[in-house]
Image (cartoon, rainbow, N blue to C red):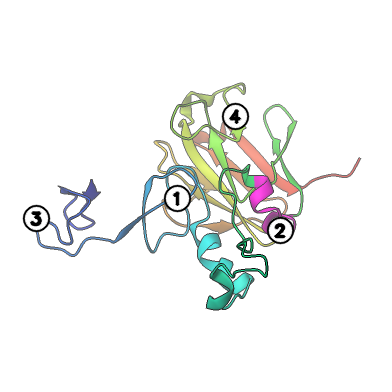
């Protein structure tokens, strides 16, 4: 189903305009990582967090003529091997060239002074265990996490920069005690204070990973 961005009316995936208000509907494509529907203009898959622009940028990252994509017959009559992208491989293997620029970082849980090392990936989900988008940073073991949504916030890594955004949580995400609007991204700098929910009860300090 496609939800109309104007009136929220559900429409079939094949519809080009809303049957209720006639508003043009967004064009959908399929996420190559999980198969979920995603808008063509979307940067990340809303289901698994896959970077959709990464696939779109592959032709620019690896220029290749149209002739190179056509299997050429070798002298012995065989077919030359074509380059392929193994989408079945683990994400870290498929896109290690993109993730290698990440600077290691960590979150310091203020209330318990616990350090959490952030995994090396393009999208890092913060929340509690669930069947839809399992968290990369599980906060369920910390105090007062009843105010934290299962899918609460996400950290996105672009080059060497970390961004945080709220994922539509019930109690909001706060940066340095200011609320972060849903859909807005905040570029993190060392020392930024990230609070999951109101009241500054579940709080993390963003910082570069300390060398040991």
Q: Is residue 168 magenta?
A: no
Secondary structure of the residue carrying numbered label 3: loop
Can you tell which quarter of the image residue 161 is in? bottom right
Is label 2 in contact with label 1 (beta carbons under 8 Å)? no
Dot placed on the residue nearer the N-terminal end, 3 or 2: 3
Q: What's drawn in magenta, residue-wise?
A: 92-102
Dot placed on the residue nearer the N-terminal end, 2 or 1: 1
According to the picture, the residue beneath numbered tag 3 turns out to be 19
- Residue 199, percent from left and from top: 51, 34
Is label 3 in contact with label 1 (beta carbons under 8 Å)? no
Secondary structure of the residue carrying numbered label 4: strand
Mark 4 surroundings within 10 Å by alpha-carbon count, few (fewer than 14), some (14 through 19), many (20 or more): some
Which mark, residue 97? Answer: 2
Measuring 67% from the left and 65% from the top, which residue is drawn there?
Answer: 76
- Residue 68, percent from left and from top: 59, 73
**Mostly what secondary structure, the magenta segment?**
helix
Front-most of 162 and 84?
84
Alpha-carbon distance for marks 3 and 1?
26 Å
According to the picture, the residue beneath numbered tag 1 turns out to be 45
Alpha-carbon distance for marks 3 and 2?
44 Å
- Residue 32, percent from left and from top: 47, 50
According to the picture, the residue beneath numbered tag 4 turns out to be 138
Dot placed on the residue nearer the N-terminal end, 4 or 2: 2
Mark 3 surroundings within 10 Å by alpha-carbon count, few (fewer than 14), some (14 through 19), many (20 or more): some
Foreground mark, 3 or 2, reads 2
- Looking at the image, how many numbered discs can be counted on the residues? 4
Q: Is residue 55 above or below residue 67?
A: above
Mark 2 surroundings within 10 Å by alpha-carbon count, few (fewer than 14), some (14 through 19), many (20 or more): few
């Amino acid at each position: 189903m496609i939800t109309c961005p104007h009136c929220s009316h559900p429409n079939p995936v094949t519809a080009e305009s809303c049957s209720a208000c006639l508003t043009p509907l967004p064009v959908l494509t399929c996420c190559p990582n999980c198969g979920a529907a995603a808008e063509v203009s979307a940067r990340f898959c809303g289901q698994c967090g896959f970077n959709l622009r990464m696939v779109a940028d592959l032709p620019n990252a690896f220029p290749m003529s149209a002739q190179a994509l056509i299997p050429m017959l070798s002298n012995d009559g065989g077919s030359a091997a074509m380059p392929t992208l193994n989408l079945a491989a683990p994400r870290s293997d498929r896109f290690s060239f993109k993730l290698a620029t990440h600077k290691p970082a960590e979150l310091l849980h203020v209330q318990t002074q616990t350090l959490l090392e952030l995994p090396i990936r393009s999208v890092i989900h913060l929340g509690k265990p669930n069947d839809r988008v399992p968290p990369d940073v599980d906060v369920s073991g910390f105090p007062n996490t009843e105010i934290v949504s299962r899918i609460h916030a996400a950290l996105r890594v672009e080059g060497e920069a970390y961004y945080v955004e709220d994922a539509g949580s019930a109690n909001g995400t706060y940066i340095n005690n200011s609320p972060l609007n849903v859909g807005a991204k905040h570029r993190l700098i060392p020392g930024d204070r990230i609070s999951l929910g109101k009241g500054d009860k579940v709080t993390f300090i963003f910082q570069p990973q300390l060398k040991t």
